[in-house]
């Protein structure tokens, strides 16, 4: 089937009333995840989700139950992303969504699917609430792993924050609070430690190390290296016979 034929069928479906509910309704639904768990439990009933499920009941699959399942899969995917943005560990959030998607395939009745929808909402709400009240240690750990894996490239603070699911300004503030320095300085210190290791290897010139670690040019790398170690890369290479890495670490370089 070509694209034109697909689009014709979609437009025909829309003309027959198969419209998705408004985005602001989705926002109201997902805002439930930010509520305090006990309050959410008190208001979360099948009636809350019934209109959305009914709207999709004949749209997303050949049968009513299949359609509801597909709609629930969409919901799980979005809720998992919402949780990540709230600071829940990305790997765990996606793994949990995979579990629920596989589990829903074992269900055969609408009532079971409705109960699962409520259980999923409560579970992700609990994850977000716990994360808000125990700090964002996992998000910071994830950021450090991200930096470590990208020593040989360039990543901005926006890139790192996006990986953790946090807004950049908030991420930077949180990182500094927990690690004692800005994420940029921490990332650069990691790069400088790796630079010192590379500069000790045969055949690694300053230019080669700069390129390997994602710096625009040797001059930029040299300025950064001197800023963090107190000497230039060439001076460091010349001093290798006099100092070893342990000596530099003791000096806090």
Image: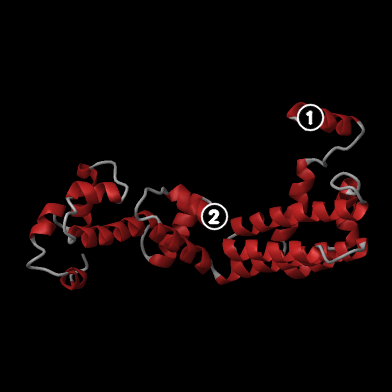
Where disc 2 sits, the SS reads loop
Q: CA distance from mark 2 to mark 1?
A: 37 Å
**The N terminus sits in image quarter:** top right
What residue appears at the point 67 percent right and 66 percent down from the top-left corner?
A: 96
Which quadrant of the view contains residue 149? bottom left
What residue appears at the point 39 percent right and 57 percent down from the top-left corner?
A: 183
Position of residue 111 measured from the top left corner of the image (x, y, whole percent) = 92, 64
Q: Is residue 232 visible?
A: no
Q: Which is more N-terminal, label 1 or label 2?
A: 1
Residue for badge 2: 166
Q: Is residue 149 above or below residue 28?
A: below
Residue for badge 1: 7
Residue closest to the eye, 159 or 171: 159
Which quadrant of the view contains residue 216? top left
Q: Residue furthest front?
A: 1
Where disc 1 sits, the SS reads helix
Position of residue 31 measured from the top left corner of the image (x, y, whole percent) = 73, 54
What residue appears at the point 46 percent right and 48 percent down from the top-left corner?
A: 158
């Amino acid at each position: 089937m070509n694209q034109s034929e697909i689009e014709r069928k979609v437009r025909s479906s829309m003309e027959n009333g198969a419209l998705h509910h408004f985005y602001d309704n989705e926002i109201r639904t997902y805002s439930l995840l930010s509520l305090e768990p006990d309050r959410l439990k008190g208001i979360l009933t099948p009636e809350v989700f019934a209109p959305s499920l009914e709207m999709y009941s004949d749209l997303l699959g050949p049968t009513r139950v299949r359609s509801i399942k597909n709609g629930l899969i969409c919901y799980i995917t979005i809720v998992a992303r919402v949780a990540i943005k709230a600071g829940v560990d990305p790997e765990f959030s996606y793994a949990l969504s995979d579990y629920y998607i596989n589990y829903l395939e074992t269900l055969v009745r609408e009532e079971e699917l409705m109960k699962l929808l409520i259980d999923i909402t409560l579970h992700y709400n609990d994850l977000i609430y716990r994360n808000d009240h125990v700090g964002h240690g996992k998000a910071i750990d994830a950021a450090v792993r991200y930096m470590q894996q990208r020593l040989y490239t360039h990543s901005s603070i926006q890139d790192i924050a996006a990986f953790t699911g946090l807004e950049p300004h908030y991420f930077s503030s949180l990182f500094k609070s927990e690690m004692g320095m800005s994420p940029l300085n921490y990332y650069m210190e990691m790069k400088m430690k790796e630079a010192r290791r590379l500069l000790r290897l045969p055949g690694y010139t300053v230019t080669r190390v700069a390129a390997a670690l994602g710096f625009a040019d040797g001059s930029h790398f040299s300025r950064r290296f001197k800023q963090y170690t107190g000497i230039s890369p060439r001076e460091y290479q010349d001093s290798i016979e006099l100092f070893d890495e342990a000596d530099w670490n003791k000096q806090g370089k």
